[in-house]
Image: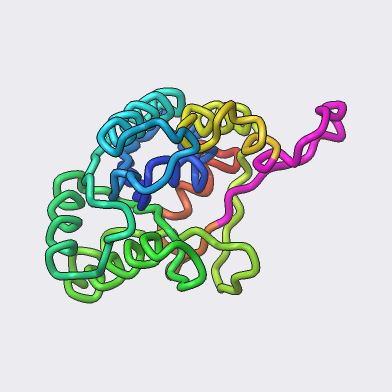
Amino acid sequence: MKILFIGAHPDDIELMAGGIIAKVSHKHNVCCMVVTNGDKWSCIDTLSRENLIEKRIEETKKAFEILGVKKTIFLSLEDGLVFPTSTFQKILQKQISLVKPVIIVTHSLSVHQHIDHYYTSLTLKKLRRNYPNYYSKIEILKELLEGQKQKNIIKFDVSDEIEKKCMAVKQHTSQFGNGQRIEKTLTGGGEKPPIKKRRRYFEVFYTDNPYNKRFRNLCKAVNGNTDS
C-alpha cells in the first residue's frame, strides 16, 4: 500500500505523523512530500538563507531515514508563499500522479494554523473537486488540530514509536536546538513511569470516508492489526 505524507515545511510531517510512519514504513511504501524549503526562520542566527535551506534538507533526510521513509520529494517553494493557484495545483497533481498513493496524509483544512498548512490542504481539496474520478481512488486523511471539531475521527496509537518520533523531530536542530524542549512537548515531559502506568500517545486525524477499505487497512496496521 502506497501512502503519501504531505507537509508544508520541513519537520511538519514528523510532528504530524512521525509515529504512524515509524509503525507502517517497514511494511508499506511510504513517500513524503515537503512543499516549502523552510527558509524563513531558524534558532541559529548565524545561518545564511542558502545555508539554512541546505541544512533543513539534510535534517529532513536524517529524520526520514530514522522513520524508514522510502522516498522524499522536495518541492522547494519559498516558505510563506504557498497559495492554491493553478500552478501549485499542477505541481502537486504531477507529483501525486507519479507516486500513485492510495492514501494521502496531510494538514487540517482549518484557517486556524500556519497559512502554508491551510493552503496545502485547500489545494488538495481543489484537486479532489477538479479530478473526482482520480481522487475517488485515494483516501485523504487530515490532521485534527487541538480544539477542532470534526466527524469521522481516528486516533492512531503510536505509543510504541514515540521515542523514534522524538528522535526524528530532534534532527531539526535549526528549529529546536538540542531538542529537549520539543521532546518534552511531544511526551509530556518528566521521568518515565513504570511500564504498566506508562501514558499512551496518539496522532489524530479525520477523514471524509471512514468506511474506505484502504483507510481501514491503515487503521489496522497502526493500531495493532497489521493485516492489509
Residue 162 visible in the picture: yes
Which part of the image, by quadrant, shows the C terminus?
Answer: top left
| Closer to us: 10 or 134 | 10
Report the residue at 49% width, 29% height from top: 173
Residue 227 visible in the picture: no
Q: Which residue lies furthest to the front in this view?
A: 46
Q: Quadrant of residue 145?
A: bottom right
The magenta stretch spans residue 202 = yes
Q: What is the basis of the colouring in this image? A: rainbow
**Span colored in magenta:** 185-204
Report the residue at 25% width, 35% height from top: 50
Report the residue at 47% width, 71% height from top: 110
Which part of the image, by quadrant, shows the N terminus?
Answer: top left
Q: In which quarter of the image is residue 85?
A: bottom left
| Closer to us: 120 or 226 | 120
Q: Is residue 180 left or right of 10 when viewed as pictured?
A: right
Q: Is residue 110 left or right of 79 when viewed as pictured?
A: right
Q: In this view, does 125 lie above or below 21?
A: below
